[in-house]
Amino acid sequence: MTPRTFWRASVLTAGLTFAIPAFAADQATAVLMDPDGKEVGKVTLTAVPTGVLLDADLTALPPGDHAFHIHEFGKCEAPDFKSAGGHFNPEEDEHGLMNKAGPHAGDMPNIHVPENGKLHIEVLNQMVNLSRGLLDKDGSAIVIHEGADDYKSDPAGDAGPRIACGVITK
C-alpha cells in the first residue's frame, strides 16, 4: 500500500500560495477555558514554512472585539489567568502591531465575536514557531482578553482582563 497525501489547507501570504501536508506538519493545541473552568474553544497550531498557522474554533465567548495573544508561560490559573505571564516576546520588543518598536511575537489581530459567541478564524503568525519557544520547558498559552487591543499601548494593548486561556500542548 502506498501512502496517500492529504492536503490540510492552502495558505495565502504575501502573494504566495502553498499547500500544507496534514500528516507532515508539527502541530500543537490549546483548549481555551473561561475563569469558571468552562471550555470556550480550541486553537490548533500548525507549523508552516513561514511561521505558525493558528486555527481557532471558538464556541462560547462574549460578543464583541477581543484581543487574541500568545502569552509567555504555559499556565492558565483561574480566575485571572495572570499565571500565563505577559505576551510572548523573546526579542524584547515593545507591544503593538502599530508600534514602530514592536510588535511582540505574541501580538496578533483582534478577533470579532458575533452575538452567538461562536467564531472560526485562521491567523498566520510569522513571528513564532513551535520548535523554538512556544513548546519550551515553561510552555506558552493562548489568551483572549475582555476588550480589543489598541495595537500600540505598551506593554499589553490596554485590552482589559483575561477572559479565556489555554495552555499550548504538543
Image (cartoon, helix red, strand yellow):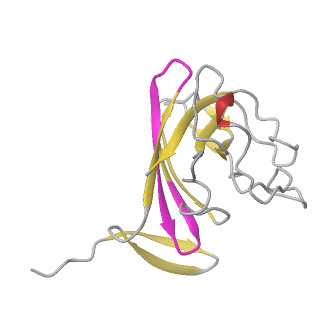
The x, y position of residue 118, in whole percent, is: 48, 36
Task: Report the residue at 81% width, 43% height from top.
Answer: 150
Judged from this view, the residue extending furthest toward the right is: 100
Tell me the residue at 84%/56% (across/down). Answer: 93
Query: As drawn, which residue projects farthest toward the left?
Result: 1
Residue occupying the far front of the picture: 137
Between residues 157 and 14, which one lies in front from this camera angle? 157
**Is 60 located above or below residue 54 in the figure?**
above
Vertical position of residue 119 compared to residue 25: above or below: above
On the rendered image, what quadrant is the N terminus found in? bottom left
Choose between 133 and 163: the one closer to the eye: 133
Residue 126 in magenta?
no
Q: Is residue 167 visible?
A: yes
**Residue 55 horizontal/vertical position (percent):** 48, 53
Q: Is residue 109 left or right of residue 44?
A: right
Q: Taking the image as drawn, is residue 58 in sight? A: no
The span shown in magenta is 34-54
Q: Position of residue 32 (x, y in %)?
A: 50, 35
- Residue 109 relative to residue 158: left or right: left
Q: Nearer the viewer, residue 148 or 37?
A: 37
Q: Quadrant of residue 146?
A: top right
Viewer-nearest residue: 31 or 98: 31
* Residue drawn at (83%, 50%) of the image: 95
Answer whether residue 46 is magenta in the image. yes
Q: Main secondary structure of the magenta part?
A: strand
Residue 155 horizontal/vertical position (percent): 84, 42
